[in-house]
Image (spheres, rainbow, N blue to C red):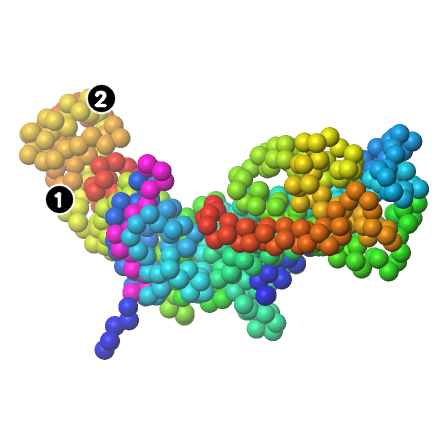
Amino acid sequence: MLAAYTLWLREVVRFLRQRSRIVGALGSPLVFWFLIGSGLNRSFQGGPAMPLQGGYLEYFYPGTLALILLFTAIFSTISIVEDRQEGFLQGVLVAPVPRSAIVVGKVLGSTTLAVIQGGVFLLLAPFAHVQFHLAAVPAILGVMVVVAFGLSGLGFLVAWWLDSTQGFHAIMNVFLIPLWILSGALFPASGAAGWVRALMLANPLTYGVSALRRLFYDQPLAGEPSFALSLAVTLMFAAAMAAAGTIAVSRKKAG
Amino acid sequence: MPTLSPAVVVERLRHLYGERVALDGVSFAVARGEIFGLLGPNGGGKTTLFKVVSTLLAPTGGTVRVFDDDVVKDPAAVRRRLGVVFQKPALDDRLTVGENMRHQGHLYGLRGAVLADRIAEGLSRVGLSDRRADLVGTLSGGLQRRAEVAKALLHRPQLLVLDEPSTGLDPSARRDIWQHLSDLRKSEGTTVILTTHLMEEAAGCDRVAILDGGRLVALDTPDALTASIGGDVVLVRARDAKGLAARVGERFAVKAEVVDGQVRIERDRAHEFVTDLVESFPGELDAVTFGKPTLDDVFVHYTGHRLG
């Protein structure tokens, strides 16, 4: 689809021309990870049979990866709000472009950027004594793509219905950050209190984080959802977001 | 000789924003190759009409057909033949002019050498060939509008719709755009629909539809519209406009209204009438002007209030 390609290309070109975005989405999770990780290192005891020699920094690594994907995906889809305000979007809407291509182009664009950022973070793993086999890298990248796609799709839905970036920031704080906090990124579901644990198991991102974490180790981890289940939920979430996005674009006439 | 169907057919178009009626049963047709103007004040319905015709908005009721395709039932078919120039440029100012054009071409299924040729041709037509590698953000408002027009014409649309094309442009830029539209009609037979609240712009169209309060109030060529006034327009400034209007009406058996604080009379052979007027009310008149009717006067004639 030529239209989806050109919309995707625009996202990437715009991103590369803006230095601040490149630093922003990568910088704060990095700082986050290092400060919180180092601070909590000694206090943290992994759940039963969780083979973590690297302490909390190691535990926190996949969650930080997920945070980078979240930040990049969301900040990229905010651009839909800008597009609408700046008038660019209307030019796309009056073109004979299938509505689904509009969603796919934007979402794939965000996904690409998120995976690039995440990839850079992966390069830092050795410095954190986070070990993983080189052979696992393609699989890790693959799961990153699916997780980023789902998050981009979610961001797209939210951005499509909002009229301003202010509203977007509110949603970010009230909804998206807690989504991440309750995803097993910061603490395992196995040790959490009843209602927290229930929320975490209902959260699609939990399964994304879990899938990522599993790929860093050779054997299954106790207290975590199985890899098969995690992957399945993550894929279904991504597909659901894509479908919802397409419906949203065909329904609401923007501008 | 068989006649081709009209380019655009609007039938009993209605649109509500919640409770507010933006379009109230508007019907008209636009002939192929015509330059058609929608004249009206802001909030009068022309922007809503523009959005419906350009497939951005599905109307509450009625139909619009563009080259026999229904804008609601088959928007993709309409979009292929439609070019739109928005009031707010639909350009990405972080991409270059050339990149914007390529992006647009792709959206319409153009690619490769064909697209490259069209871009070169389009840019040279609007005189922007030398700015091709410049970021759109560095272009002035007038140049951006030109780039917009070039962009909208890339896929050789049969119908070009423009929303307030003169906004933010200086007079020479306005003339350029207008010349361009005129050439386009001559060489490609493109049908043009534009919305405007500027009288001068409407005067250049083949036919003008006057929209006020969501209703089609008048539709004809600019000449026919001004002729329908049946005479010249006399405007009188006086301290007591209302009182004067009543007395003038009584004295001369004419319709004298107060519009915008002035007394307004439509009358043939105004130059004779004006002398009688001044003689009848010595010292009461601050200023008297008269002249051939303009579209502004036509607007007032049909709606009772000024355009501006």
Residue drawn 23% across the image and 32% down it: B259
Which numbered dot is residue A218?
none
In the image, residue B11 lies in the stretch drawn in magenta: yes
Which residue is disc 2 drawn over?
B239
| Left or right placement of residue A42 versus residue B75 in this view | right
| Left or right placement of residue B102 versus residue A47 in this view | left
In the image, residue B68 lies in the stretch drawn in magenta: no
Compared to B153, does A161 lie above or below? above
Nearest the eye: B184 or B90: B90
x and y, in percent, of residue B289 in the image: 23, 36
Which numbered dot is residue B268?
1
Residue drawn 57% across the image and 46% down it: A157
Location of the C terminus of chain B by quadrant is top left
x and y, in percent, of residue B193 in the image: 36, 56
Confirm whether residue A23 shows in the render: no
Residue drawn 38% across the image and 57% down it: B72
Report the magenta residues as a range: B6-20
Instruction: Estimate the spatial distance between the alpha carbons at disc 2 and disc 1, rounded to whole Å.
Output: 25 Å
Compared to B113, does B91 lie above or below? above
x and y, in percent, of residue A44 in the image: 87, 33
Nearest the eye: B139 or B38: B38
Nearest the eye: B118 or B170: B118
The amino acid type, in three-letter code, at marker 1 is: Asp
Confirm whether residue B11 shows in the render: yes
How many callouts does the rendering have? 2
Compared to B257, does A105 lie above or below? below
Residue drawn 29% across the image and 65% down it: B6
What secondary structure is marked by label 1? loop
